[in-house]
Image (cartoon, rainbow, N blue to C red):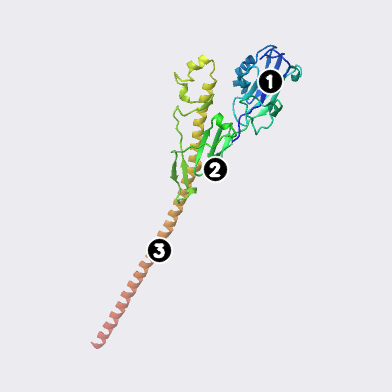
Amino acid sequence: MSSPRPRPAASTTTAAPRPPGVLLSSITLEIAGPDGVEVLTFQSGVSLDSVVAGVNKLSAIIGVEASLVNGDVNSGIVFNSAEFGSSSFVSVRRLGGPDPADDGWQTLRFDDADEYPDTSGGFPWGSLIDATRDKGRDVSALINGNLATGKGLNVSVNSQSLGVELLLAESFATDPTATNSTFNVTGGGALFQLGPDITAQQQLSVGIGSVAASTLGGVLDEGTLHYLSSIKSGGANSIEASVQRGDFTLASDVVQSAIDDITILRGRLGSIERNGLQTNIRSLQASYENLTASNSVIRDSDFALETSKLTRAQILASSGTTVLQLANQQSQQVLQLLG
């Protein structure tokens, strides 16, 4: 399993002694992400905490988040995409000003996008190269021996025996060394026989997920899944809670995700009806018409046979009557001669 989240840009200070955790000089950064681009200017002496806060205020607009390296203001700043997957990227570029190396500001990224080193103990600077942009990767995994389709943290597989879509935890999906995880499917779906033959080609498996508010709109935020039910009064993403936080982004994402869930379900059921049920209905109707036509031919053939038998019987009866009449006439003629 490979990491889907881009680790594109790490900023650190390597120059000679300076005030801890602050910028040595004014700097203008162009920060681009999958959602947009913003240009931010920070004055000399601004703390790195303030830089992180300024970037994160615009996270919903540009799709980029900033954080301190290892939580230490003296270690530098790392920029990550807010989302996961190959459609996510981060670009951090300094506009104007002196050479970044002159004041200790460097923009770096991981050298090999396929191998993300462990940063729990700090950034391994020897494995980094100068760069201003990096992009993410979709997670890849095997489910039941089948290669699943990955999109961000989501993996899905659709085979004859199993159709499932999973949202993986960030810690699991982004760890290439993660061991296998086992799960069991205890129910769901039903098998319908659509054609006259008991074969897989004439059978359809249909499973409809729950559309309860507690299962719709699952959005992963800081390791917690938020569902549509969290927007109700008293919920974690209710209007009151969002007003207190001053941020409706998560609630909006949950609602949009719930709409997407229902739309996908309706589209799937519509596809099953049109391409599965209606197709088989038309096929069965054609078969019924053919059987009816064949039955009619058979019935017509029987009617003709019985009619020919009746005609034959009528001819035989008429012939027999004629023969008897002739025989009676001959007897009368003999009696007349004798008299």
Dot placed on the residue nearer the N-terminal end, 2 or 1: 1
Q: How far separated are the C-alphas under marks 2 and 1?
A: 43 Å
Look at the numbered disc 2 and give the secondary structure of its residue: loop
Residue position marked by numbered label 1 in the rendering: 12
- Residue 92 vs residue 142: left or right? right
Q: Nearer the viewer, residue 92 or 170?
A: 170
Dot 3 corresponds to which residue?
304
Depicted 310 relative to depicted 117: above or below: below
Q: What crowding class fits label 3: few (fewer than 14 Cα within 10 Å), some (14-19), or many (20 or more)?
A: few
Give the farthest residue toward the bottom. 338
Identify which residue is drawn at 34% across, 72% down: 316
Query: Tag 1: residue type?
Result: Thr
Where residue 332 appears, x then y in whole percent? 26, 82
Give neighbour class at mark 2: few <14, some 14-19, many 20+ (Cα, 10 Å). Answer: few
Which quadrant of the structure image shows residue 153?
top right
Label 1 residue SS: strand
Residue 172, horizontal then vertical, whole percent: 55, 31
Residue tagged by mark 2? 145
Identified by mark 3, the residue type is Ala
Q: Nearer the viewer, mark 3 or mark 1?
A: 1
Left or right of residue 108: residue 272: left
Three-letter amino acid code at the position of disc 2: Gly
Q: Is residue 82 above or below residue 190?
A: above
From the viewer's side, name the closer residue of 279 and 97. Answer: 97
Residue 53 location (% of width, % of height): 61, 16
